[in-house]
């Protein structure tokens, strides 16, 4: 997986934006101003912080060695995922969608993207 592929998938989420509020080394992805992903694009392999339901976060950490508690984030609600070549696309893409949906669910209905169903 390349940074280009990862960025394309993140920005394909309805209403997603990218910025660098913490400096050029961390790409931040938001929906309605709320973060749903942070990418350390200089890491080799790439790593991404994703929001996660707390019980699922613990389960993923037990099952997948690529998943750790969120680096510099609330460890209960965020995971850091190392995007190694052995990690199936369906997994990391599903985790991104889960993170995005958790953030969207917390938004007032008026701020949710039109393409997202409540």
Image (cartoon, helix red, strand yellow):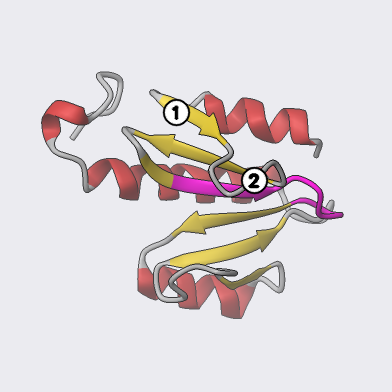
The span from disc 1 to disc 2 (Cα, nearest Å) is 19 Å
Stretch in magenta:
36-46
On the image, the x and y values in percent for residue 108 come to: 13, 38
Residue drawn at the location 84% of the way across and 51% of the way down: 85
Q: Specify the quadrant that holds the C terminus.
A: top left
Q: Secondary structure at mark 1?
A: strand
Residue drawn at the location 28% of the way across and 27% of the way down: 116
- State left or right for residue 114 relative to residue 3: left
- State left or right for residue 103 relative to residue 59: left
Can you tell which quarter of the image residue 107 is in? top left
Q: Residues within 10 Å of mark 1 (few under 14, many from 20)?
A: some
On the image, the x and y values in percent for residue 6 come to: 68, 35
Q: Residues within 10 Å of mark 2 (few under 14, many from 20)?
A: few
Q: Residue furthest left?
A: 109
Image height of 57 relative to 98, above or below: below
Comparing 43 with 67, the one in front is 43
Q: Which residue is mark 1?
A: 16
Comparing 77 with 91, the one in front is 77
Q: Which residue is mark 2?
A: 23
Can you tell which quarter of the image residue 100 is in? top left
Within the magenta stretch, is there residue 40? Answer: yes
Q: Residue furthest top?
A: 114
Comparing 42 with 106, the one in front is 42
On the image, the x and y values in percent for residue 1 come to: 80, 39
Q: Earlier in the sequence, mark 1 or mark 2?
A: 1
On the image, the x and y values in percent for residue 15 come to: 39, 23
Residue drawn at the location 64% of the way across and 25% of the way down: 8
């Amino acid at each position: 997986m390349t940074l280009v592929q990862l960025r394309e998938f993140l920005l394909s989420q309805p209403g997603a934006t990218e910025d660098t509020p913490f400096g050029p080394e961390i790409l931040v992805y938001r929906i309605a101003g709320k973060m749903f992903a942070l990418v350390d694009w200089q890491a080799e392999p790439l790593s991404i912080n994703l929001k996660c339901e707390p019980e699922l976060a613990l389960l993923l950490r037990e099952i997948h060695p690529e998943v750790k508690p969120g680096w510099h984030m609330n460890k209960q609600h965020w995971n850091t995922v190392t995007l190694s070549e052995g990690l199936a696309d369906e997994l990391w893409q599903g985790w991104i969608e889960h993170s995005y949906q958790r953030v969207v669910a917390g938004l007032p209905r008026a701020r949710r993207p039109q393409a997202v169903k409540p």
